[in-house]
Image (cartoon, grey):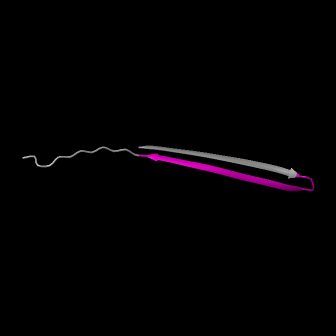
């Protein structure tokens, strides 16, 4: 089983003339999950 998680956050802050402020926050997340299995069986053994 494999699990991979990636996250990215970006923050931006800007101050303008006149005392105005702008704050931005953006984010991205990616998840990857993989599972493999193998099985075998037999019936009819005495």
Vertical order, 18 against 9 (above or below)? below
Residue sticking out furthest to the right: 18
* Position of residue 7 measured from the top left corner of the image (x, y, whole percent): 60, 46
In which image quadrant can residue 5 be found? Answer: top right
Left or right of 38 on screen, residue 29: right
Residue at 83% across, 50% down: 14
Left or right of 2 on screen, residue 19: right
* Position of residue 39 measured from the top left corner of the image (x, y, whole percent): 27, 45
* Position of residue 10 measured from the top left corner of the image (x, y, whole percent): 70, 47
Vertical order, 21 against 45 (above or below)? below
* Position of residue 46 measured from the top left corner of the image (x, y, whole percent): 6, 47
Residue at 78% across, 53% down: 23
Magenta-span inclusion, residue 17? yes
Left or right of 25 on screen, residue 44: left
Q: Which residues are magenta?
A: 16-34
Residue at 75% across, 53% down: 24
Considering the image in quadrants, where does the N terminus appear?
top left
Residue at 90% across, 56% down: 19
Left or right of 18 on screen, residue 29: left
Residue 7 versus residue 36: which sits nearer the camera?
36
Magenta-span inclusion, residue 8? no
């Amino acid at each position: 089983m494999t699990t991979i998680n990636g996250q990215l956050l970006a923050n931006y802050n800007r101050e303008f003339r006149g005392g105005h402020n702008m704050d931005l926050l953006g984010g991205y997340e990616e998840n990857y999950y993989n599972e493999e299995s193998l099985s075998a069986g037999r019936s009819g053994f005495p």
